[in-house]
Image (spheres, helix red, strand yellow):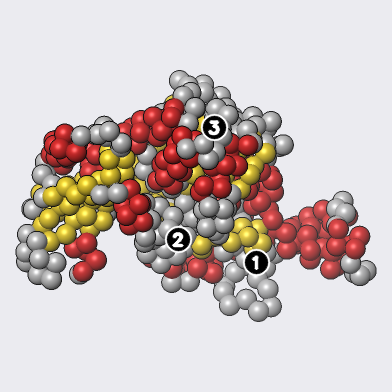
Amino acid sequence: MAISYEWTPEEQREYSLAKLFRYIKDYVYPYHPHYRKLLKDSKMSPDRLNTYDDLRRIPITEKNDTLADQKAFILQPKTEDTEYDVASLSRTKELGYAWKTLNTRYLRDLYGKPRTFTERVKHTAASEWLPIHFHASGGTTGSPSLAMYTNHDIRKVIPMMAGMMYLFGWEPTMRALNMFPALPHLAFFQVIFAEFTVDNGGAFFHTCGDKAIPTERQVQIAGTMPFDMYIAIPSYMTYWLKTATWMIEAGEAAKPDPVKYAVLAAEPLSDEYRDRLKAQFEGIGSPDIKIIDGYGSTELRAAFFECDEKTNIHLNPEFYFWEVLDPESREPVKWGEPGVLVFSHVDWRGTVLLRYWTGDLIQGGVVWEKCPSCGLTMPVLRPPIGRVAGDFTKIKGARVPLMGFQNAIRRVDGVESFQVIITREDEADEMSGDRVVVYASLKPGSEEEAVKSQITRQIKLDTEISPSEIVVEGPESIETRLFERTGLKADWVVDRRSLKA
Ligand SMILES: [Zn+2]
């Protein structure tokens, strides 16, 4: 039975937990090398999982736990050359594959050399278990994580996730310009999944990123084909819109048809950031654009969206079991209270995680109620979303939120682009005082001294720190440094002190 988004939150949670327990019993315990060992070692029988407290006896999984042996996190029945203690496929499952094979017409048998029925049954089984698609995280936050998908995931689970973009108003007849770089990352492939697995998913043009199609060329394409939606990383979107603005003004590109949605993900999107982007969209003739935030990760294996502008990220409770835990005690917090998002996969094959600690601190908590915007009942992440570690730094002895610099500068009119560098008075001397240098490029016609004093004032308001120096320079040098490290996401704030250590 599928979940209903008309159910009460309690009914949904009960459903989600029961589905997770069935999944642990039927799939995780028999076929997951890591969790099978964990459950066996702690003498936990999957038959005795009944309540949420029972689930909490399964230890939290952290990123480091998965890095030691990522293969042990892939569901796999016993084969002749298996290196793990996992169960063989049950007789019932084998009969199920035989039955399914009788009712399946494989292209392999249309074009390939004749094969036996047993070989065809093996083919059917492989489509459930054998990984066919892979993602690796960018590694900007440490060692890369891997995620493997089987045919079962792509056909049975992914469409249920990718289809959630209908929440915000996407229609199967619309067209989208995907600006995510073509990398083995979730963000790029979530769009491919939407294109190929969801109903008649709509039309997508994949630029594959500015290394494949230079930004100037992308802007020209957008001026010749109508698009309803742009999909990008926020900092690249900013750069793209800036490029589009001057190209349109210079007559080097046509103004694109009005765009309805910009779906942005992979970087935090504050209200200041959205306002900034909206003003830029207005400049290229899309004043009614809705900016939709997205949230996903390699480990999650899917991405989630808002149901409308500023309605916050809606999560799926059918293929995940969600928990929100106190960052220190790791005890569950009440719905709507701040805590770290923790998830368990339900009904996936390939890479599977139970009680995975995302490290994402949902400062507004997770609300699970009927959404006033879409009318559906779902768990919703209330921002801001921060990292448990790494979001704050010590400057001149004070604890400063790094996001504070970005939000402050985005409120200043006249700033075109910026970068904040935190360094020391003497870079070679670890004991010397901290220095905060703001690099800014200005919009044409802005008064330099006025902008500088505004930057100082806003930063002081948000962080209680006064910048040591504000350097005004051309947009090219800032742009180059912003994307220098990753080529993907802008480094708005760089802490040089931590690079030295
Ligand atoms: Zn909603």
Q: Which residue is mark 3?
A: 255
Crowding near the residue tagged with mark 1, few <14, some 14–19, many ≥20 C-alpha atoms within 10 Å: some
The outermost residue toward the front is 250
Crowding near the residue tagged with mark 3, few <14, some 14–19, many ≥20 C-alpha atoms within 10 Å: many
Where residue 463 sits in the image (x, y, percent)? 16, 42
Numbered badge on residue 77: 1
In the image, is the residue at mark 2 within 8 Å of ligand 1 by its beta carbon? no
The image quarter in which residue 172 lies? top right
Q: Are marks 3 and 1 in contact (CB under 8 Å)?
A: no
Residue plotted at (36% across, 43% down): 268
Q: CA distance from mark 3 to mark 1?
A: 55 Å
Instruction: Give the position of the C terminus as an image quadrant.
Output: bottom left
176 relative position to 388: left or right? right
Of callouts 2 and 1, which one flags the residue occurring earlier in the amino acid sequence?
1
Q: Is residue 303 above or below residue 142?
A: above
Give the secondary structure at mark 2: loop
Q: CA distance from mark 2 to mark 1?
A: 30 Å
Q: Which residue is mark 2?
A: 138
> Given the image, on which type of amino acid does mark 3 rest?
Lys
Residue plotted at (53% across, 52% down): 214
Residue 131 versus residue 221: which sits nearer the camera? 221
- Mark 2 vs mark 3, foreground winner is 3
> Given the image, on which type of amino acid does mark 1 rest?
Pro
Give the secondary structure at mark 1: loop
